[in-house]
Each structure stands twice: as structure tokens, then as C-alpha cells.
Amino acid sequence: MKNFHFVENNQITLLHNGAEYFPELEAAIEKAQFEIHIETYIFEYDAIGSKISQALKRAAQRGVSVHLLLDGFGSQNLSQAEINAMLQTGMKVLIFRPEFIFSRPRRYRLRRMHRKLVIIDAQIAFIGGINIIDDQHNPEKLTPRFDYAVAVKGPLLVQIHQAVKHLWMVVAWVRLKKRWIIPITIKPVDKPCGNQKAAFVIRDNWRHRHDIEHAYLEAINQAQTEIIIANAYFLPGRKFINALKDAVQRGVNVELLLQGKIEYRLQYHATQALYENLLKSGIKIYEYNRSYLHAKVAVIDQHWATVGSSNIDPFSLLMAREANIVIEDYQFSNELRTSLRTAITQESVCITPANKNLFSWRKYIVNWLSFCIVRMMHGMLGYDWHDNIP
């Protein structure tokens, strides 16, 4: 059952990497007058994190109600001293599942808050895959992480604002911070702001368990000419893979832009275990090698696009809280498609059966062992239909 719907008359702006996203975010924080909500998986106190933190503190000091929701595992490096400094300015900071992930053998430990979502004064929202982290700093001195976000204005803010308020309320109750549950004082204005049609799609452990996956599958099953998916961690289930194969059989050009730099070795090799099967079915695979790929985006038939936090793997599709935006608009879709085409043709390597090293016996064993381990971890630690609370 589809638990999301499209809304007309929005203005949606594509932001490429942190170089475009963080200045827009900081400027919006500085203009805030009433309320700021930020949800992020990672908040690293580096050059970018420090900048955003200072902007949030200034906002709180001038009377803006600032709410920061962090994931307890992804943001575990943010020091308690810095969190205390935020609280002293009047900011409200909540941690989603602060327990260390393996502190006790509980199946729900891998259910994380993976959303990257900001809404300010109920007038503008930012959604995508970009954490609060300096994407220009990495030990290998590569170019910035390849990622996207969108800025959203218009009637869709009604849904986004409601979802953010709801999650804050739920976590505040669980953390015994009832006094931080503030009545809604401002509401998005439901009036036209552009001409773009879009849907806000989330994944949670209650009513929206499969919404993001269903949005992808619906678009893939309707594709007629082209599917381009760029995803950092690609480990889909049988239904998703079969949908891509069926699209190829219909004559659709299917291209996957996947991780080329090893950031997390287990996931990287588990994904490569799928390559041979995908290539045999006619799906084209490219590995992005210029830097780390962190994008979670897709463009289908040059009119359907999605940008968000959800990878196509068990962690995102079955366990984590995620947020994507789906846009049905030719102009937006073609802007994203052009960016992905540039990455594919100029910054990636095409994978073919002729890649002898990739398909050697040694690599085959490593890849399939990794695949089995990931699936086993998912089964043992992650998925439980009855685990519906943060």
C-alpha cells in the first residue's frame, strides 16, 4: 500500500555536494526567526560542523527555538562538552538511541536515524544524503564526497514539517524530555511556490516500512527508456533486482553508478558479489573513482527523480529511518541526469566481464563471503517486525 502522495506547485533546487549545500544551510540558519529543526546521522565537529554549530548557537541566543536530533551511533564522536555548550545557549539536543550499538545483544541496535533533514521557520527544508561533516577533508586528499541535497519550498513543507515534529515528539517522550515537546506555534503556508510536483517519502518501523522501496519499484516497473541509479551502498533484495532485469528485457537502458573507493570494505565486497549476475542480465555498472560516492539518487525516463538519505541495502530499506524526496519534473530530472552523466563518463570506470581481477577466484570468494556476512548480520541483529519504537 502506498503511504505517500504527490503535491503540486513546489520549488525544488538541486544542490551538488557540500560546496553548494552548506553555504545555503548556514545562510538559512542565520535568517531564521522562529524555529529550526535539524536531523542528521553524523554531526562531526570539524571545520563544517563547527561553522554550523556556531550558527545554531547564535540562532538560539537570539530567541530561535533550535532542535537538533542526532543519531547515537553516527554522531558518537561529537563530544559531550560540545553538546553541553549547545545546551547552554538554549538549544535542545536529543540523541536517537544513544546506547553503543553492541553494548547489549539487542536486535534493534542497527535501527538508526539515518535521515539528513532540516526545516527552518516552516518556510524552507533541506533533504538529501549530506551529513554535517566536512566533505572536503579525507585522509587520502581526494576531491569532496560525491553527494546531493535539495532545497524545498512550497506546499510539500506541510508533510515535511509534520514528520519532523512527530519524530522529535516521539524521541523526546522516550528520553523523558516532555518539557521539550513544544506545541506547534508556526505552520507551513500551503500556497504555490513553484511548478514542480513532488512527494516526501520516509521509511520508519510502523506505517512507512516499505514506502521508499515501493517508490523505486513503481518507477522502475513503469520505466520505458532509461534508469540511472547512483547509490553508495547497493545491496538490494531479489524483488528489486528482478525489477531491474525486467526493465532491461523491455528494452530499458539500466545503468548503476556505484562505489569505486573502498570506504567500508565489507559492504564494498558484498556489492561486488552481485556484479556478475547483473552484468549478464544486461545492466551496465560503473564505479565512481574520483572520490567517495555518497549519493543516494536516481533518474528514470528523464522525468522522475529521487534524492535522499536511503541507500538500496538492508540497512536503509529495512532498518533505518530514512527520508527521500521524489520529484516528477523534466527540468529537475534532466539537471540531475546531466550531473550523473558527467560522473559516469568522466569520473568513473565501466565494469565489464573482462575485468579479470574483479572476477578472479580469490575475489569471488572474498565477495561472496562478505555478502553472506552482511546478510547474516542483517538477519541476526537488525530486522524485527515488532520493533516499532526508537
Image (spheres, helix red, strand yellow):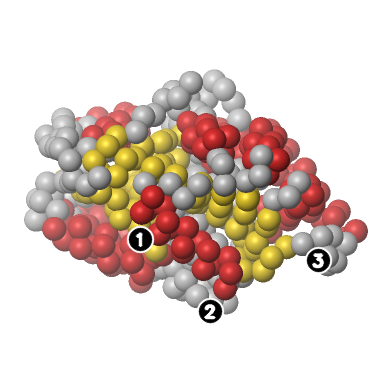
Mark-to-mark CA distance, 2 and 3:
27 Å
Mark 2: secondary structure: loop
Task: Give how far across and how far down residue 333 sits, in percent.
Answer: 42, 52
Q: Nearer the viewer, mark 1 or mark 2?
A: 1
Marked residue nearer the N-terminal end (2 or 3): 2
Tell me the residue that label 1 is attached to. Answer: 15
User: Alpha-carbon neighbours of circle 2 within 10 Å: few (<14), some, or many (≥20)?
Assistant: few
Which residue position holds label 2?
141
Residue type for callout 1: Leu
Q: Looking at the image, which is closer to me, 147 or 86?
A: 147
Which residue is drawn at the image coordinates 36% and 37% (left, top)?
199
Q: Residue at x 85, y 55 (%)?
A: 364
Helix, strand or loop at label 1? It is: strand
Which sits in the foreground, 69 or 77? 69
Which residue, given by chain and number where applicable, does mark 3 sit on?
355
Q: Amino acid at mark 2?
A: Lys
* Above or below for 51 versus 252: below
1 or 2: tag closer to the N-terminus: 1
Pointer 3 or 1: first along the chain: 1
- Residue 115 seen: no
Disc 3 marks which amino acid?
A: Asn
- 280 in relation to 316, above or below: below
Question: Are circles 3 and 1 on residues that touch, CB within 8 Å?
Answer: no
Mark 1 and mark 2 residues within 8 Å of each other at the beta carbon: no
**Quadrant of the rendered image containing residue 101:** top right
What residue lies at 42% left-to-right and 35% top-to-bottom?
A: 202
Q: Is residue 365 left or right of residue 307?
A: right
Residue 8 place in picture, x, y as percent: 27, 37
Q: Is residue 231 visible?
A: yes
